[in-house]
Image: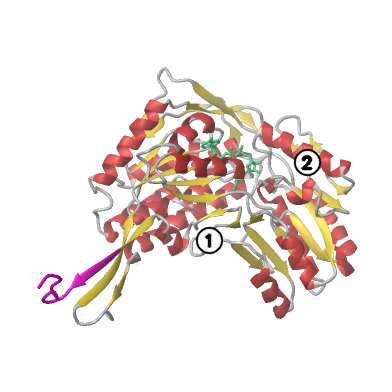
Amino acid sequence: MDKCSSELSIPSAPRDFGFYNNGSYVAAGTREIFTRSSPGHGVPVTRIPKCTVEDLDLAVDSARTAFDDRRWSGLNGQARAAVLLKAAALIRERSEEIAFFETLENGKPISQARAEVGGCADMFEYASGLARSLHGDSFNNLGDGMFGIVTREPVGVVGLITPWNFPFLILCERVPYILASGCTIVAKPSEVTSATTLILAEILTDAGLPDGCMNVVTGSGSSIGQALIEHPRVDMLSFTGSTAVGRRVVEAAGRTNFKKLGLELGGKNPQIVFADADLEDAADGVAFGIGFNTGQCCVSGSRLIVERSVADEFAQMLREKFSKVVVGDPLDEKTQIGAITTDAQNTTIMSYIEKGSAEGAELICGGEQLDFGRGQYIAPTLFGNVTGDMAIAREEIFGPVLTIMPFDTIEEAIEIANDTEYGLAASVWSKNIDKALTVMRQVQAGRFWVNTTLAGGPELPLGGFKQSGWGREAGMYGVEEYTQVKSVHIEIGKRTPWIE
Ligand code: TXE
């Protein structure tokens, strides 16, 4: 065991996982294996099988059979809720193990991973109630001869493709809601962060979920992911990831069986700061909004739009905040910003930083790789003198890089905020309620924060406007998303004949 600066140790050998089919692990056997090294330390931490397309077919068969024979959707809400509640308890019981693997594979700080796992148990607890309260509608106003009801039915087999930035959180913003609706699942986590998805499948079986309702295939996006989005026996696909792959998902659904889609894609989210804000709070919130999860967050507040009269002062405040934030070993409990998750993402972020300088933006602070002897780390980076046509102002960087653009009027602030193809999230900082609510109404985003940022929880839905996606996850909306609606007309009494 290699000792870190905290109590936690890097494992001396990687942990072997199988993939998960029909209620149990399937060992890798002769399949190729992907060895994942921790981005914070460069040490192998997990070994995951690369599933074949035949493995995927098997998993879809399992989910299909489990759905079609109604072993799950045929249970009452109380029975489904009991499984979800038990799963929540088991997540809490195994929270340290889950947080540990989340940190090892992803590079996020352990304190953050622990908080996320707690939040995930809460998702299951909340969704258990929704399993019992999911209901339709009735129409008692169709006259004495007719009664109308609207029922909700589970869509069927759901393919669930998740990314590497929040492997467990994004999974748990979906799985309990999908299960509450009565659907069954074939999940495909990112190839670099599969461990905690596999652990969740095991937990669900232990919680009493019938076999076949939660299956996990592991492997690359281009092979196994692509086969899943094209699969004719999958009824719905929930995809979270890049806009480019989201487009492929839409094309694949159109080419095959028109499966229902849920998409959560990229973001370039504005943080609008007015001069009348509590600037100390705003600076802390803006720093958190871009530093959290190393900015590898679809809802990161990556564009600061600040009232010109306080722009210089605010930039100085941010610079100071950035200088104090603790970047370092993800296993150290004091760390606030951990490692960049993949080599490719590290290269992407550094190339945007170069591009920002080349395009004429002013590098106020950061901009460099931090050398801790191992792992890959980037200092929180601030760019001033940014204009709306620069790549760093338009494209999702997915790293700890914040751009600053000043505004003079509320109309201008709203115009800059909406000048993007994305519409995932936005924040406003102001003590003037008229300004805050006007901005809230006019900025196009699926999530909006007033005098805070990145707040969340199981009650409120998540999802994007514009090219940030389709559909909503979490809350009652997140359960309804995985249902389809059936309208039923019931005639009462003697029919008025068509043929006399
Ligand atoms: O995402 P991909 P990547 C953005 C972010 C980042 C960029 C690239 O800007 O820099 O995307 O990240 C699976 N068919 N976001 O390359 O490739 C893949 O295996 C089916 C934003 O990692 O979209 C993984 O499970 N599936 C985002 C998932 O898609 C495919 C979070 C996401 O990977 C596939 C992550 C295919 N052809 C990245 N190709 C957010 N919204 O939070 C890949 N996959």
Q: Is mark 2 within 8 Å of ligand 1?
A: no
The residue positioned 78% from the left and 46% from the top of the image is 391
Q: x, y percentage for residue 167?
A: 54, 43
Q: Which mark is residue 457?
A: 1
The residue positioned 49% from the left and 34% from the top of the image is 226
Position of residue 16 in the picture relative to residue 338 (left or right): left
Q: x, y percentage for residue 350?
A: 78, 37
Check disc 2 and report the residue beneath it: 352
> Which secondary structure lies at badge 1?
loop
Magenta stretch, main secondary structure, is: loop
Front tag of 1 and 2: 2
Disc 1 residue type? Gly
Dot 2 crowding, Cα within 10 Å, few <14, some 14–19, many 20+: many
Residue 11 location, quadrant: top right
Q: x, y percentage for residue 279?
A: 80, 68
| Residue 285 in view of the camera | no
Magenta-tinted stretch: 487-500
> Which secondary structure lies at badge 2?
helix
Q: x, y percentage for residue 242?
A: 60, 43
Reply yes or no: does residue 264 show up in magenta: no
Disc 2 residue type? Tyr
